[in-house]
Image (spheres, rainbow, N blue to C red):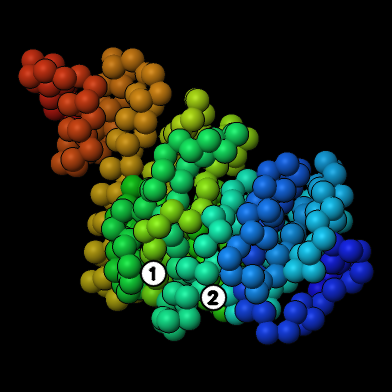
Amino acid sequence: MDSGASSNGGSDTQAEDLGTTRVTVGIPTYNRSSWLREAMESVLAQSYEDFRLLICDNASEDGTRDMVESFRDERIVYSRSPRNIGMVPNFNRVMNLTDTEYLMVLPDDDALYPDYLRSTVAVLDAHPSVGVVHTGFDVVDHSSTVLHGGLVMPGSEGFEPRERFLERIMSTPIGAVCWSSALLRTRAMVDADGQRPSDEPYADFPLLMRIALGWDYFSLAAPLVRLRVHEESGTAALGSFIGGDYYVSQQPTILFDHRMRFLEEARLEPERDRRYRALAKRAYLEGSVETIAARARLGARWTSTAVELARVVRRHPRTLTVGSTWRLIGAQLGGRRAKRAALRVLERAA
């Protein structure tokens, strides 16, 4: 443990003091003491009680230390960086300070439901080949009101062999795992090199792909975490946030670039590499249309939506072959005459 680590009572604490503890819940944090309190309370309320709660404070200036030390629970370990080292290095500090078999890195603005650890630990215990187990989740707003309940990543139900997971993460326009719901074998994360600063933003995305080179995945459908969306989140800062939703216009490009860099590094057999590249290109097209649709849902006029879609089709004519294009046209324009007009515009653009 580094010199900045102490128990919430203030004395130095070594992880070995926790004996046979097998689980660490690590929370990297910076200047979010209010939401951090809620996250900590959700961890301490777990029905599975044998864990260590590690708080890695990235030099907060809002009284985070005093708030953490107001808890009187021997399972809490607080470690403060003397300076702000950045989000990814602070994430990796959680990993480097962990010596338990299992590790969850919980964002400081999210929270767990009481049976999260009991449910996910049971999966890793029962499936030695599984490196990551993730769950369903609820999306909540700034005040913890549920906006969308019982969400599950599409196509991820139950046991998922590593090859199938890689196909899914290559082909989905969005992420393949809700990171806030993921419990990992610590060795799987360490062997995959943790998160890399060069992978920002969405540095968890390539980490999950690297883990899948050696480990299987498992998904539980039950919503066991609360994922918060708000205007101060890192994701919202990449795009636009309106009410209880946001869209990131560059997300398809960012994820496509992550996939391509992963494939260059992984050096898979040629046939598999070609298949993954084709899936990634289609996911990029689907995602590009989905970001336009998200902007439309947030109030964009249908004329600007059509113009933006036409630009994408002009750059990538195969956009006309993906289902989301025609779902968007049907939802936004409506009526046979409008759809025929839209088709003429898109065909000219192509």
Query: Residue 290, image x and y in percent?
Result: 32, 36
Query: Residue 142, image x and y in percent?
Result: 59, 34
Q: Residue 218 has which mark?
A: 1
Query: Residue 88, image x and y in percent?
Result: 65, 56
Q: Say which amino acid is labelled 2.
A: Arg
Q: What element carries label 1?
A: strand
Q: Mark 2 points at which residue?
A: 185
- Horizontally, residue 6 falls left or right of residue 297, namely right
Disc 2 residue crowd, few under 14, some 14–19, many 20+, Cα 10 Å: many
What residue sits 68% from the left and 84% below the top? 20
Identify the image quadrant of residue 16: bottom right
Please state, as top left, top right, bottom left or bottom right, where the C terminus lies in the image: top left
Q: Say which amino acid is labelled 1.
A: Phe
Q: Nearer the viewer, residue 153 or 213?
A: 153
Disc 1 residue crowd, few under 14, some 14–19, many 20+, Cα 10 Å: many
Identify the image quadrant of residue 92: bottom right
